[in-house]
């Protein structure tokens, strides 16, 4: 064996030993493999447990719902429990629903599913509902929550307790502590409702609230026993609110307050603007005033219906049953209008955008009241109907019709129609009713005529058409200042020709009467009388503050003095009460004027003092008695006494002595004709009953026989 062979065998041996050592080292001791562990049980009672479960329910070849869960447990009898559950309901009431919860338990037939822990339902249109515990009933498609629940959809959110939700009809009901809000685009709450119970009908688009309802809508506070809020098509806005039972609304842009048994509020589709309000059952509305802190007009009635323009101005009102409308005072200073109130059976107001109400009509048992203010007493009117013209809260015109009765202080006006203008304080009464023609009365006078126009400040009355008046007896009449507590009284009296305790009648075609001064001007066939005493003329003027009287134009008088009548006529008859003087006169040409070629009739007075004529006749009465004290006649005087006729320039009759004193002028002496005798002189004095005559201071005695002599006949020519 050669050397290389020995070396090769040695190498092979070393490699073999090394390989054996390596194999041995690699084998070492063998590990024993542990057995595979069995899965942990969530509920030992479950007969089947599975992970990533999915359950689908089909009904009449249609998928009814799908249940997906992280874990599913099945029990004897067929009941199931799901952990980390998601329930998907398709096309239920036109919407798809997804419900998630931590756990859910299903009955054997899967008709009822009880979910607990962070229960949340989301509809395909965004409606979301959350609760801690809920029960789903597949048979009637309802979800019930015995405890607290919250829900939301767009701008709407709500909460409550004891909820029932029907997925088919999409109706959600809260059994207690209902709370629902609506927000604007900025997320700010603009509507908030609370009530004992609530029902949200999403398909029918309304929210019904029952029991102790309270709501906030912008600045309004709303209360009622029950309420119904109707939703817009997108359910983002409330466009109609019905309040039932003890309804009240306070605050807001338009109202200070509203109250009624029931109230309906209709808004624009976006819920931003109120278009109409209806109140039923003792309704009342107080509108917001134009100025901060001022009250606006107020409406009350058994039923009220108000409509508004887009600019929020009131354009229509209808009220029925026990209507009451209050129009507040407006303006400033002397132009401030008083508060006015109207009551009636029915009422309708109309207007225009930007102007508000411009007209109103009241019917049935109308009563109009205007409050007293500085230098003006309260005014009241009653009628069957009333038409008002309005500008803001001010009355521009009032037309009363049907048995009108208007009063201010002691002034009362009646008639079939009356037109009242508050701006100038005038009242026009026309038309006949059951009580007769238009009639006005105050403490001084009663007036009846075809038409009467009254300026209430004063008052001043213009009457026309067969005017009939009664002047009341003398009295002390309180002036407006006295009525307002500032003192003052005005004494009115009849002319001293008449008895002060008895009324005087005056008729004419027209009358202009000023109550403040007691001055009355009667025109056209004017006649004044008391008992047997009467005065007639074209125009009669009385001043009751002075007790004066003037009759002009074919004036005539019939006056009883001391049981004896005197009949007078003249162009003008005047009575001056302070002087106790009656003057009969005819016009006298002014100095330098050309007198008419044929003089007009002279003033005449025919009575116990004889038949007297002259340009002017003055009768002076006794200071305290109704008798003639003295009589004066001037210019072209003639008097006939029994068979005597006297002419001269002036006559004075002294009634106490039955003495006549007549004077003439140098060119025309006094002349007395007694049968066939004639006496002339500068001054002649004679007596009514005695046979004495004094001529220029020389007395003559006349005998009866001489007066009875027969005058010789004048020879015929």
Image: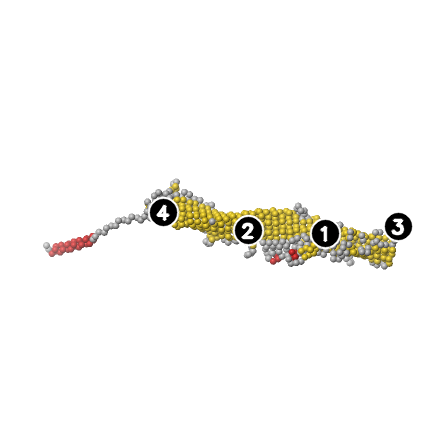
Q: Decide if residue 435 is on the left or right side of residue 157.
A: right
Residue drawn at x 88%, y 53% is 703
Q: Decide if residue 495 is on the left or right side of residue 104.
A: right
Q: Rate crowding at label 2 as few (under 14), some (14 to 19) or many (20 or more) other CA atoms within 10 Å.
A: many
| Residue assigned mark 1 | 502
Instruction: Provide residue 689's location: percent of width, then percent of height.
Output: 84, 53
Instruction: Provide residue 604's location: percent of width, then percent of height.
Output: 79, 53
Q: Secondary structure at mark 2?
A: strand
Q: Of label 2 and label 3, which has the lower sequence position?
A: 2
Q: How many marks?
A: 4
Is label 4 or label 1 in front?
1
Labelled disc at residue 329: none
Q: Decide if residue 483 is on the left or right side of residue 656.
A: left
Farthest-out residue, left: 1
Q: Of label 2 and label 4, which has the lower sequence position?
A: 4
| Residue assigned mark 2 | 285
Q: Rate crowding at label 3 as few (under 14), some (14 to 19) or many (20 or more) other CA atoms within 10 Å.
A: few
Q: Of label 4 and label 3, which has the lower sequence position?
A: 4
The answer to the question of whether label 2 and label 4 lie on touching residues, with beta carbons closer than 8 A, is no
| Residue assigned mark 4 | 82
Distance from label 2 to label 3 (Cα)? Answer: 101 Å
Q: Of label 3 and label 1, which has the lower sequence position?
A: 1
Distance from label 4 to label 1 (Cα)? Answer: 110 Å
Distance from label 2 to label 1 (Cα)? Answer: 53 Å
Figure check: 111 above or below 331: above
Q: Secondary structure at mark 1?
A: loop
Distance from label 3 to label 1 (Cα)? Answer: 52 Å
Is label 4 or label 3 in front?
4
161 or 641: nearer the viewer: 161
Labelled disc at residue 710: 3
Q: Is residue 304 visible?
A: no
Distance from label 4 to label 3 (Cα)? Answer: 159 Å
């Amino acid at each position: 064996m050669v050397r290389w062979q020995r070396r090769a065998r040695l190498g092979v041996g070393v490699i073999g030993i090394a390989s054996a050592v390596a194999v041995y080292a690699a084998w070492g001791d063998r590990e024993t493999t542990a057995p595979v562990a069995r899965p942990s049980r969530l509920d030992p009672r479950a007969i089947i447990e599975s992970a990533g479960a999915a359950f689908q329910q089909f009904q009449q070849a249609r998928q009814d719902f799908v249940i997906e869960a992280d874990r599913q447990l099945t029990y004897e009898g067929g009941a199931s429990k799901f952990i980390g559950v998601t329930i998907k309901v398709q096309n239920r009431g036109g919407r798809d629903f997804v419900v998630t919860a931590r756990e859910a338990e299903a009955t054997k037939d899967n008709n009822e599913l009880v979910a607990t822990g962070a229960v949340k339902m989301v509809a395909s249109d965004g409606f979301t509902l959350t609760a801690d515990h809920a029960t789903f009933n597949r048979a009637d498609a309802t979800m019930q929550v015995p405890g607290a629940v919250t829900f939301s959809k767009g701008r709407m959110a709500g909460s409550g307790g004891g909820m029932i939700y029907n997925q088919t009809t999409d109706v959600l009901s809260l059994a207690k502590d209902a709370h629902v809000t609506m927000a604007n685009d900025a997320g700010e709450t603009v509507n908030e409702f609370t009530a004992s119970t609530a029902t949200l009908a999403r398909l029918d688009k309304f929210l019904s609230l029952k029991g102790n309802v309270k709501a906030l809508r912008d600045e309004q506070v709303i209360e009622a026993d029950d309420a119904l809020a109707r939703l817009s098509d997108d359910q983002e806005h409330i466009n109609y609110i019905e309040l039932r039972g003890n309804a009240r609304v306070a605050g807001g842009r338009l109202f200070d307050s509203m109250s009624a048994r029931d109230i309906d509020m209709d808004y624009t589709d976006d819920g931003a603007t109120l278009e109409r309000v209806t109140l039923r059952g003792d309704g009342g509305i107080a509108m917001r005033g134009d100025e901060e802190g001022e009250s606006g007009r107020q409406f009350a009635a058994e039923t009220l219906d108000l409509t508004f323009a887009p600019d929020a101005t009131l354009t229509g009102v209808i009220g029925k049953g026990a209507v009451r409308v209050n129009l507040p005072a407006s303006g400033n200073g002397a132009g401030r209008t008083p508060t006015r109130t109207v009551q009636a059976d029915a009422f309708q107001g109309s207007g225009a955008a930007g102007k508000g109400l411009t007209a109103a009509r009241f019917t049935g048992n109308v009563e109009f009241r205007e409050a007293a203010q500085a230098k003006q007493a309260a005014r009241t009117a009653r009628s069957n109907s009333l038409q008002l013209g309005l500008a803001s809260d001010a009355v521009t015109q009032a037309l009363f019709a049907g048995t009108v009765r208007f009063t201010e202080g002691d002034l009362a006006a009646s008639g079939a129609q009356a037109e009242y203008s508050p701006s100038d304080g005038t009242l026009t009464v026309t038309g006949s009713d059951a009580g007769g023609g238009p009639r006005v009365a105050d403490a001084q006078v009663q007036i009846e005529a075809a038409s009467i126009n009254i300026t209430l400040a004063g008052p001043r009355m213009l009457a026309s058409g067969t005017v009939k008046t009664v002047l009341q007896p003398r009295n002390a009449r309180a002036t407006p200042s006295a009525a307002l507590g500032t003192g003052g009284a005005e004494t009115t009296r009849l002319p001293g020709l008449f008895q002060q305790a008895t009324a005087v009648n005056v008729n004419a075609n027209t009358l202009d009467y000023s109550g403040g001064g007691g001055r009355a001007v009667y025109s056209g066939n004017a006649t004044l009388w008391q008992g047997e005493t009467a005065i007639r003329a074209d125009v009669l003027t009385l001043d009751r503050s002075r007790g004066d009287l003037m009759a002009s134009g074919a004036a005539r008088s019939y006056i009883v003095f001391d049981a004896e009548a005197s009949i007078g006529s003249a162009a003008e008859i005047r009575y001056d009460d302070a002087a106790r003087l009656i003057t009969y006169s005819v016009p006298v040409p002014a100095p330098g004027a050309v007198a008419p070629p044929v003089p007009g009739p002279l003033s005449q007075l025919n009575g116990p003092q004889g038949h007297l004529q002259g340009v002017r006749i003055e009768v002076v009465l006794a200071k305290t008695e109704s008798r003639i004290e003295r009589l004066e006649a001037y210019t072209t005087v003639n008097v006939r006494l029994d068979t005597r006729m006297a002419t001269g320039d002036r006559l004075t009759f002294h009634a106490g002595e039955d003495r006549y004193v007549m004077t003439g002028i140098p060119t025309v002496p006094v002349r007395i004709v007694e049968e066939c005798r004639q006496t002339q002189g500068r001054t002649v004095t004679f007596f009514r009953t005695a046979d004495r005559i004094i001529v220029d201071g020389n007395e003559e005695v006349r005998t009866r026989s001489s007066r009875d002599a027969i005058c010789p006949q004048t020879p015929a020519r």
